[in-house]
Image (tube, coloured by chain):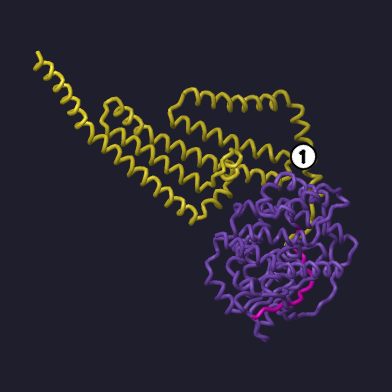
Chain colours: A yellow, B purple
């Protein structure tokens, strides 16, 4: 009886030790991966920050309006600092995933595989949003200046409309890439912008037909009067 | 080389434009005209003033459109690959004049008489003309910055031809439209301008826009600051260059309106004295440009 009891304890202890010995290399591998990963992330952050400073990234971001957006959003980091931190955290996340993978726990492995499959969609969406924002700022500014030089009083409204249209379009495309409620997003976008176009068509085409007639008559008379009022100054 | 739409050109112009080259050894002959006191506003507000202050030569009509140049200078021009840029459009005149001065060619000017064009196409737009000329001026500042930073004052150039009075047709100017355009610019473009101008300059513009049509005035030193700040901004790239140039147009129209209003009753000689006084301000404030330009470069 004593022998059986002793054997049971020894067996249990040996099994536990066996599992620890099997698990220990994985744990050590995880710790090693984490240490190296954090180190690489820190070094990469410094290198990227120095590179971005060398290419005057903060000044370019100022031109594109990114600095304004960040300060309005309450972020005090410069664009170069923010981008280098972004890459730091990407490396940290990858390090954590690799570390978890090293533990060889079956439950996490499937999730990790799904995460890596999803990552390209995340990057594509970020690129779409950034490019969309830059295009929105550029075109909004171009429309504003052109409208002012044509003496359109509602220049600012036109500029904002163009800017928001492009931002919403790029947001829609980003969400579509992420696969978040794709059909709802497409339907919502179509309904909203289709609705706006239809409302304007009805308002001007049906409700404003007399107004449109008066407007066109005034435009035609106005062009003749404007021709009479034109400068004949020679600018060059 | 002469403008293709001239009505006042005479055969004597050919002799006047070429004689200084083959008799006196000059390489570049710029025109001098008898023009209406309000004609050539881009020349009188920007190009003549900047060219004189930067490169030290008082060529009165640097973008006149009618020039004589030697074979040596023509061969030099052909070595430059600029034919796909704004230089090949409205910027060609200032490019030719600036290179002739900056590269050390012998330059002079000759009096040609009245400059009268064909009737202007009412649909023709100030925009492309303005942006192409000013972009050429600002672009050349970048190429020749070592040269113009060293020049401290301007000198007159040799002038040929007999200066005589000419009869000129009256000009109509729509001041209300110009001032309206300026006010709209201040209202909607001030945020873009603030990226290029000092805050005091932007506040100054806002205060002028609030004045009535009769009281509004565009002081000389404000105008000089604006031109220099925009030149620095163009070089620095703080705003997209095409947007920067187009956003200058309301400021230019504000300045032209103020100039026309102040000189309605002035004679041509008095207007020329006013332009000369503005040239002095451009030259006196050149250290402001040099300092701002160097700071912008230091930030690169």
Observer-nearest of A207 and B61: B61
Q: Is residue A101 above or below residue B77?
A: above
Q: In the image, is residue A126 above or below residue B233?
A: above
Counting labels gives 1
Q: Which residues are magenta?
A: B106-119
Residue occupying the far bottom of the picture: B23
Q: Quadrant of the C terminus of chain B?
A: bottom right
Is residue B157 found left or right of A15 in the rendered image? right
User: Looking at this view, is B210 or B36 the one in front?
Assistant: B210
Can you say which quadrant of the picture contains the N terminus of chain B?
bottom right
Q: Where A185 sits versus B8, above or below?
A: above
Query: Can I make out residue A138 in this image?
Result: no
The residue closer to the viewer here, A219 or B240, is B240
Residue at 80%, 80% in the rendered image: B162
> In the figure, is residue B272 to the left or right of B295?
right
Name which residue lies at 55% across and 65% down.
Answer: B82
Residue B258 sits in which quadrant? bottom right
Instruction: Locate residue B147, reporting x and y percent.
Output: 61, 73
Question: Looking at the rendering, which quadrant does residue A168 occupy?
Answer: top right
Which residue has dot 1 on it?
Answer: A220
**Which of the 4 image quarters holds residue A212?**
top right
The residue at the far front in this view is: A2
Chain letter for mark 1, please.
A
The residue lying at 91 percent from left, 62 percent from top is B265
Q: Nearer the viewer, residue B105 or B237?
A: B237
Q: For mark 1, give the secondary structure.
A: helix
In screen coordinates, is B170 left or right of A151? right
Tell me if residue B267 can be seen: yes
State the residue at coordinates (66%, 54%).
B196
Q: Residues within 10 Å of mark 1 (few under 14, many from 20)?
A: few
Point out residue A147 in the picture as x, y percentages from the top left corner. Answer: 69, 44
x and y percent of residue B208 in the render? 81, 51
């Amino acid at each position: 009886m004593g022998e059986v009891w002793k054997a049971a304890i020894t067996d249990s202890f040996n099994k536990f030790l066996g599992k620890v010995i099997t698990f220990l290399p994985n744990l050590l591998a995880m710790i090693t991966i984490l240490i190296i990963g954090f180190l690489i992330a820190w070094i990469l952050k410094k290198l990227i920050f120095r590179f971005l400073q060398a290419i005057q990234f903060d000044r370019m971001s100022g031109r594109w309006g990114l600095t304004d957006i960040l300060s309005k959003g309450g972020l005090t980091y410069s664009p170069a600092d923010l981008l280098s931190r972004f890459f730091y955290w990407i490396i940290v996340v990858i390090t954590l995933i690799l570390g978890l993978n090293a533990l060889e726990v079956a439950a996490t492995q499937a999730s990790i595989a799904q995460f890596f499959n999803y990552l390209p969609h995340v990057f594509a969406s970020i690129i779409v949003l950034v490019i969309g924002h830059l295009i929105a700022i550029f075109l909004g500014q171009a429309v504003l200046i052109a409208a002012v030089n044509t003496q359109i009083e509602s220049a600012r409204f036109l500029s904002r409309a163009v800017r928001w249209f492009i931002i919403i379009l790029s947001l829609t495309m980003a969400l579509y890439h992420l696969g978040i409620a794709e059909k709802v997003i497409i339907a919502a976008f179509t309904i909203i912008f289709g609705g706006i176009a239809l409302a304007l068509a009805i308002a001007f085409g049906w409700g404003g037909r007399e107004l449109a007639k008066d407007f066109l008559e005034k435009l035609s008379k106005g062009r003749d009067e404007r021709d009479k009022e034109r400068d004949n100054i020679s600018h060059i | 080389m002469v403008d293709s739409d001239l009505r006042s050109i005479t055969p004597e112009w050919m002799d006047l434009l070429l004689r200084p080259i083959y008799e006196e050894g000059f390489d570049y002959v710029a025109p001098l005209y008898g023009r209406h006191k309000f004609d050539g506003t881009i020349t009188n507000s920007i190009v003549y003033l900047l060219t004189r202050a930067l490169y030290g030569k008082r060529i009165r009509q640097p973008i006149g459109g009618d020039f004589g140049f030697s074979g040596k200078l023509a061969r030099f021009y052909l070595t430059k690959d600029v034919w796909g840029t704004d230089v090949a459009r409205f910027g060609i005149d200032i490019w030719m004049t600036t290179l002739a001065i900056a590269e050390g060619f012998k330059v002079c000017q000759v009096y040609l008489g009245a400059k009268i064009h064909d009737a202007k196409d009412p649909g023709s737009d100030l925009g492309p003309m303005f942006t192409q000329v000013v972009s050429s001026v600002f672009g050349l500042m970048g190429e020749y910055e070592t040269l113009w930073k060293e020049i401290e004052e301007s000198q007159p150039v040799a002038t040929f031809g007999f200066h005589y009075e000419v009869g000129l047709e009256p000009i109509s100017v729509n001041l209300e439209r110009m001032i309206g355009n300026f006010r709209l610019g201040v209202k909607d473009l001030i945020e873009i301008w603030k990226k290029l101008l000092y805050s005091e300059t932007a506040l100054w513009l806002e205060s002028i826009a609030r004045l009535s049509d009769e009281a509004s005035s565009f002081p000389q030193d404000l105008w000089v600051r604006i031109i220099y700040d925009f030149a620095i901004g163009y070089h620095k790239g703080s705003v997209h260059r095409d947007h920067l140039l187009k956003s200058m147009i309301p400021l230019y129209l504000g300045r032209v309106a103020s100039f026309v209003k102040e000189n309605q009753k002035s004679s041509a000689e008095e207007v020329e004295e006013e332009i000369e006084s503005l040239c002095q301000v451009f030259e006196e404030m050149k250290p402001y440009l040099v300092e701002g330009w160097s700071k912008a470069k230091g930030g690169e």
